[in-house]
Image (tube, rainbow, N blue to C red):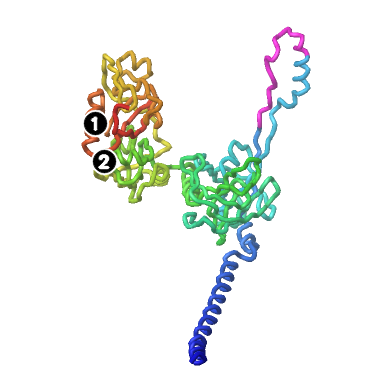
Amino acid sequence: MQPQAITSFNGLASPIVRFRTLWLTLLTAVMVLAQVALAEARPESLAPLVDKVSPAVVNITTTTMVEGRTGPQGIVPKGSPFEDFFKDFQDRNRDQDRPRRSTALGSGFVVSEDGYVVTNNHVIDGADQIQIEFFDGKELEAKVVGTDPNTDIALLKVEAKEPLPFVKFGDSDTARVGDWVMAMGNPLGQGFSVSAGIVSARNRALSGTYDDYIQTDAAINRGNSGGPLFDMEGEVIGVNTAILSPNGGSIGIGFSMASNVVSKVVDQLKQFGETRRGWLGVRIQDVTKDVAEAIGLTKPEGALVTDVPDGPAKDSGMLSGDVIVTFDGVEVKDTRALVRQVGNTEVGKTVRVVVYREGGTKTLLVTLGRREDAEKTAPGAENGDQSSPSEQQMLGMSLVVPNDEMRQELGLPDDAKGLVVTDVNEASEAFEKGMRAGDLITEAGQQKVTTIAELTARIDDAKEAGRKSILLLIRRGGDPRFVALSIDDTSK
């Protein structure tokens, strides 16, 4: 029986072995195909792409008249024994005091056959003369059409006898981290140069209001500024603008302003010679977790309105304490997103703005103004007067109703009304969140407060509503800001 059992088992094993062999063969084939596909994802050579786009990439040379150095003045008093020595020193260096011409180098690219050229504003800022050199060596003088320091973009124009080769803007929003990109320009004045890399990160912000940078490890150096960042289709998805480097050279962290920002700026500069951004007319701050909890929002998103001066938002009925949750049909994630969206919206357009107010939402119709024309007005403090200060300890702070003498001492408007912070316990949450002596609390729980009793009532209301914190509106130097403080123990 033993041999028969073995024979039976072997008969069963044969199809299993054949199946396993077939499965391993198929798996090997799949892996080979995957490796081939991965290899094909990166082109064998970028030469065809370079040949396609290089005629539209330009070197830019600017010339600027620089005032000479006047030399040290008044280093020694008149009559000093060293006076003649310093006079001789200044005479020997008199040539350096004369005005001289300074040159700078950058890059750019042609975006239309009639000669419009895009570059960085810092490349041509203050230039007396701008010379454009094309890939084939031809040179033309360029004139400035318009600039936008906010995005560091400039639009130039050259006059040519024949249509010029140009490149198109791509959709930077479709660029993914890991996509291959190619940078072209004039690094360190060495002439036309190509570097390649990938998209390292998206939506980087450096220092500007409208920043939307693509981070790349493609080599970018001085002289690359204003040059294009191409995708593998030969479309411009960014304008090379800045690098992060401890030594001034590329270490693989470069930043290109996203094409979806640049193309809008270029269109406005071409049409108007200047930018025309939408203006809502509010001061805002991000919604933090504690602020969201204090006002009853389910998640910390949106833009919290801290002040509504005269302007489009005020005309629509928007109030301080509103949280803007959608703008023109798009959800607002934070203040940066709102500022960019408003700025990109057409001036004069009437948009629907949904705000969260007192536990519900309200839709407002706002006709946008123009940001460039908006006059910045300092927000006035609340009206009112108190004559006899009475200090009390609440929320980790010493609070008092200001009188005329205190208003003058603190530099507050004569009609300022609210509660002045005279001291903050350094171990308290209030101190941790930035409250300082001299701050003026004008609202609590999104209602005006002018007395300690009113603040106490607002805290009691918040407790009854099951809230763990209360939202305070404070003003410091005229600037408003919301702070959410815990109310579990108001005696802190």
Residue indicated by mark 2: 357
In the rendered view, would you say 330 is above or below 471? Answer: below
Give the quarter of the image for residue 91.
top right
Nearer-N-terminus badge (2/1):
2
Q: Position of residue 346 (x, y in %)?
A: 39, 46
Q: Over which residues does the magenta segment extend?
A: 66-84
Between 207 and 116, the one nearer to me in the picture: 207
- Which residue type does callout 2 highlight? Arg
Is residue 244 among the parts visible in the rendering?
yes
Viewer-nearest of labels 2 and 1? 1
In the rendered view, would you say 412 is above or below 238? Answer: above
- The image's mark for residue 458 is 1
Q: Secondary structure at mark 1?
A: helix
Bin the neighbour count of mark 2 within 10 Å (Cα to Cα): few under 14, some 14-19, many 20 and up. Answer: some
**Residue at coordinates 32% horizontally, 38% vertically from top-left?**
312
Between 295 and 226, the one nearer to me in the picture: 295
Q: Secondary structure at mark 2?
A: strand
Residue 451 is a magenta residue: no
Name the residue at the top extreme: 79
In the rendered view, would you say 410 is above or below 461? Answer: above
**Residue at coordinates 53% horizontally, 54% vertically from top-left?**
237
Q: Position of residue 423 (x, y in %)?
A: 37, 21
Give the quarter of the image for residue 356.
top left
**Residue at coordinates 34% horizontally, 26% vertically from top-left?**
396
